[in-house]
Amino acid sequence: MNQNEKRLFLIKRLLKEQPRYNKIQIPVDIEEQKTMLRSLMNIRMPDTVDDEFLNVQDEYLIQVNSEKGVVTLSDMEEIQPDVYIWKGDITRLKVGAIVNAANSGMTGCYQPCHNCIDNCIHTYAGIQLRLTCARIMEEQGDEEPTGQAKITPAYNLPCDYVIHTVGPIVQGKLTKEHEELLASCYRSCLEIANENGVETIAFCCISTGIFRFPNERAAEIAVKTMKDYKEKTGSSIKVIFNVFKDLDEEIYREMLR
């Protein structure tokens, strides 16, 4: 099967799982098909699926991720020894681990085609990631506490692992507790990365989006926690601050120059 055939196969299989969508027409336009496939993946509850589906999905996503352009450490700017800044889509990074700003349910974003990092990571990793996260949460027996971290395989992403952490939500005034919880997110991610032999970790800007943590203060906490951890432990892990907005790039450059 070529990519078009794989995409149609996946759409038809996902529609078949959802009887209420049986009468939906599959669009002819390729971009609309891509949107439909992503939407169906986003709303799918964590569950097993047969090997045929997984093989087609994996082949399809590996090519999609390759076409987006894989980014390695050599493509990034080393702004301090073992510290890098890179602006762009975190799902393109071929590194040891990327950090996902997750919600407390830990199974991804269910809003079709939402542009949050949680949605993007789950979309391009494949449906296996949601099931793995669901199993972790079932074993845990409760929602994920803010400030901790879990590690999973990255499946079809170019990185080796995804580290999931739940950042603090700022409602109203920023408090000391918010700051301590955010620092705990960065520290927990570094700890679990080192425990699993990860040599390079890419951090997104945890909590600065819809969780409303002030960007500049979040960056200060991220940089300080990283430096304190490396100094205290002697860790040689390479840290990438992955930003998406011009504002965050300017903040990190000023902070790390």
Image: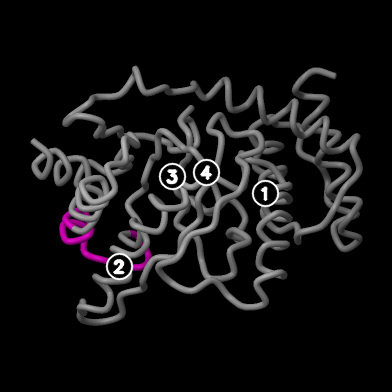
Residue located 82% across and 37% down the image: 54
Tag 1 secondary structure: helix
Marks 3 and 4: CB-CB under 8 Å? Answer: yes
Residue underneath mark 3: 194
Residue located 75% across and 57% down the image: 44
Q: Which image quadrant for residue 243?
A: top left
- Is residue 189 found left or right of 83 in the rendered image? right
State the count of labels. Answer: 4
The CA distance from mark 1 to mark 4 is: 18 Å
Residue 121 higher or lower than 257, as above or below:
below
Earlier sequence position, callout 3 versus callout 1: 1
Q: Which range is magenta?
A: 209-220
Residue underneath mark 1: 129
Residue underneath mark 4: 196
The CA distance from mark 3 to mark 2 is: 29 Å
Could you tell me which quadrant the C terminus lies in? top left
- The amino acid marked with disc number 2 is Arg
Foreground disc of the pair 2, 4: 4
In the rendering, which numbered label is found on residue 212?
2
Earlier sequence position, callout 3 versus callout 2: 3
Tag 4 secondary structure: loop
- The amino acid marked with disc number 3 is Asn
